[in-house]
Every structure is written in C-alpha cells, then in structure tokens.
Image: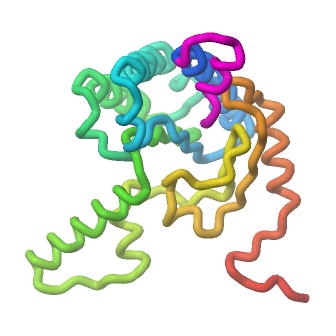
Amino acid sequence: MDGNGRWAKKRRLPRIAGHRAGIGAVRQAVEACARLGVPYLTLYAFSVENWKRPHTEVKLLMALLREYLKKEIGELTKQNISLGVIGRIDRLPNPVQRDLQNAMEKTRRNTGMRLTLALNYGARAELVDAVRTLAHQLNRDGSIKIDEDTLSRHLYTRGLPDPDLLIRTSGEMRLSNFLLWQVAYSEIWVTETLWPDFTQKDLFRAIIDFQKRERRYGGLGLG
C-alpha cells in the first residue's frame, strides 16, 4: 500500500495525513473483496524496515492501527470477515498486541473472507525465523525432513494459500521484501495510483486484468 507520504506531500500536508487517508482505501478494498467473494486478502501494513522512520511517525502509525482495529471490528464481524496477522508480532508495542489479539478473538468464528495484516513483517525475516525453528527441531530430534512443504509449514503464512495476485500502487516495480517465497508464481499488477487514491474501481480493474491472463506456473505455455 505505497504512496501515502507522496499523497500528503503533493497536498502540502504532514505524512500522517496520507496514512490517515490510506485507511479509507483500506476500508474500500476490504469491503470490495468481501463483496466479490475473495477468500483471502493480505495487506502489507508495516514492515520491519519501517522502524527506521522518524519516531513520531512510527508512534502515530501505531496509534492509527489501534484506531482502525477498534473502529472496524464491528464492520468486520458484520461482513463475516476474520482477522489474522503475520510478522514478528511479539515485537510490536504491548497495547497494539492486545488490540490485535482482541480483534482476532472477536472475529475468529467468522467464516467469510480472511483479512491478514502484515505487521512488523519482512520476507527475509520470515525465512530466517523458519530456518531457526527447523534448526531447533533438528538439534532436538536429531533429524528432520527438509523440502518445500516443510519450509512452507514453518512460515508465518502457514495455513494460507499462496497469493494469486499481487497489487502494487504508486508505480513501484519491486517486491519490497514482501512474501518472497509465496509470490513465486503470483501475477503482479502495478498502478501509478497512490494508495490513498486507490478505489474499488482500481481493484476491479486489477481483478479483470488478472482474469484475462494465462497462468503458466513456470511452464512454457506452448501449444
């Protein structure tokens, strides 16, 4: 969800204004995906690299996250959406962890779309944590089977399918350390639109474009 800062800069507003405007885009995307019957939606909300931002901005981002969780939990339940989180959650501020646990507990019985927030997330960190866990099991048990399925079961995303479609806003042409293992065969759709300006129409355009593509999963696609 890129472009919050640029959106604010274009309007000569503080960066936090862009982040707050981005919440509106989150709400639109979640509502649209739920209405379309999309089973899984993952939003990259805060990366491990984001801690390098100014302390004031990080503090305000955490406050906005808590505000979103408290305000939207009723709407998530109304739309039958369950909430999940991936990342190094134990390193988030304690009040944020409590609000996340509360939101997940209150929505865990919902059977509709699974909304996953990537918080304090980094794909390289995810792989490191998975390898550490496997190494611990090896030391404990003396042997362990290492293959793709085993590694996948130890990622933060265990239990979730690999993404079909990755959407990048604000024209960014890189993965930015997001789901590096999981997006091996995902389709990528890039738009110049800044995240706060991303509407349901943009989402529909991305999905329609995705539906027109021929997915090859590494094959040549000849014939």
In this view, 196 is above or below 216: above
Quarter of the image for residue 63 reads top left
**Which residue lies most toward the left here?**
140
Quadrant of the image containing the C terminus: bottom right
Q: Residue at x 17, y 86 (%)?
A: 143
Q: Is residue 94 left or right of residue 168?
A: left
Residue 28, above or below 74:
below
Q: Nearer the viewer, residue 165 or 82?
A: 165
Q: Is residue 106 magenta?
A: no
Position of residue 18 in the picture relative to residue 98 (left or right): right
Horizontal side, residue 212 vs residue 116: left or right: right
The reply to whether residue 60 is visible in this rendering is: yes
Q: Give percent across and percent down for residue 4.
A: 61, 26
Q: How many marks?
A: 0
Going 35% across and 35% down the picture, which residue do you hit? 51
Q: Magenta region: which residues?
A: 1-15
In the rendered image, the quadrant that contains the N terminus is top right
Where does the image place residue 79, in percent across and percent down from the top left? 60, 27
Q: Nearer the viewer, residue 170 or 96?
A: 170
Question: 142 above or below 40?
Answer: below
- Which residue is at 43% across, 78% downward? 148
Using the image, determine if residue 194 lies above or below residue 150.
above
Residue 168 lies in what quarter of the image? top right
